[in-house]
């Protein structure tokens, strides 16, 4: 089982509970052959915007930021990384995209976990691989393809 620490800095109705987040992360990591630790931090738009500017040099909040940990050789640490999720952005996206809020949370958390595992979507072939992986994981959770109606804004 994967160890997940959840830090709630911002609370809003419709946020998933720790069991839902655990299920989504465990499902995303089902093919990963070792137990890991992940920190999930739920923030507001200001917190997301500050981190987005500091680490990605992009202005404004974003739905999720992934911070993989590069563990030096010889150090025993199972920390895969941190996910910083902006709840208000997810809520707006779910409304705009006509998606169930819980399904969008699941998708974005799985998207973030895949980033922690090294997946990316900068190049078209990478994006296709990552999207297919997300679709397959979400299918295991009985959640529809989030790309059926168009791409998410990053």
Image: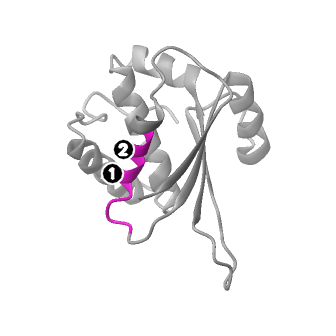
Is 8 left, or right, of 97 in this rendering? right
The numbered disc on residue 36 is none
State yes or no: residue 68 in magenta.
no
Q: Is residue 122 visible?
A: no
Dots 2, 1 in contact, CB < 8 A? yes
Q: Dot 1: few (<14), some (14–19), or many (≥20) neighbours within 10 Å?
A: some
Q: Main secondary structure of the magenta part?
A: helix
The numbered disc on residue 23 is 2
Q: Residue 61: which quarter of the image? A: top right
Q: Farthest residue in the bottom direction?
A: 74
Q: Residue 148: which quarter of the image? A: top left
Alpha carbon separation for disc pair 2 and 1: 6 Å
* 119, above or below 109, in the image: below
Q: Is residue 89 visible?
A: yes
Stretch of the chain drawn in magenta:
21-32
Residue 57 placed where, x, y %? 75, 43
Foreground residue, 154 or 67?
67
Residue 14 placed where, x, y %? 45, 18
Give the residue pinned by disc 1. 27
Number of callouts: 2
Residue 90 placed where, x, y %? 50, 25
SS class, disc 2 = helix
Q: Residue at x 60, y 20 (%)?
A: 11
Q: Residue at x 21, y 46 (%)?
A: 140
Q: Residue at x 67, y 85 (%)?
A: 74
Q: Residue at x 56, y 53 (%)?
A: 38
Foreground residue, 75 or 143?
75
SS class, disc 1 = helix
Q: Dot 2: few (<14), some (14–19), or many (≥20) neighbours within 10 Å?
A: some
């Amino acid at each position: 089982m994967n160890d997940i620490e959840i830090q709630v800095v911002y609370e809003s109705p419709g946020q998933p509970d720790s069991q839902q987040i655990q299920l989504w992360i465990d499902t995303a990591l089902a093919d990963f052959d070792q137990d890991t630790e992940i920190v999930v931090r739920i923030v507001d738009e200001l917190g997301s915007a500050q981190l987005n500017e500091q680490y990605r040099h992009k202005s404004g909040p974003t739905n999720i930021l992934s911070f993989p940990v590069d563990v030096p050789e010889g150090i025993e640490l199972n920390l895969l990384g941190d996910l910083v999720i902006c709840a208000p952005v997810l809520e707006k996206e779910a409304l705009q995209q006509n998606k169930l809020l819980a399904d969008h949370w699941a998708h974005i958390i799985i998207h973030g976990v895949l980033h922690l595992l090294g997946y990316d979507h900068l190049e078209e072939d990478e994006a296709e691989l990552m999207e297919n992986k997300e679709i397959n994981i979400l299918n295991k959770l009985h959640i529809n393809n989030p790309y059926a109606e168009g791409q998410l804004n990053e």
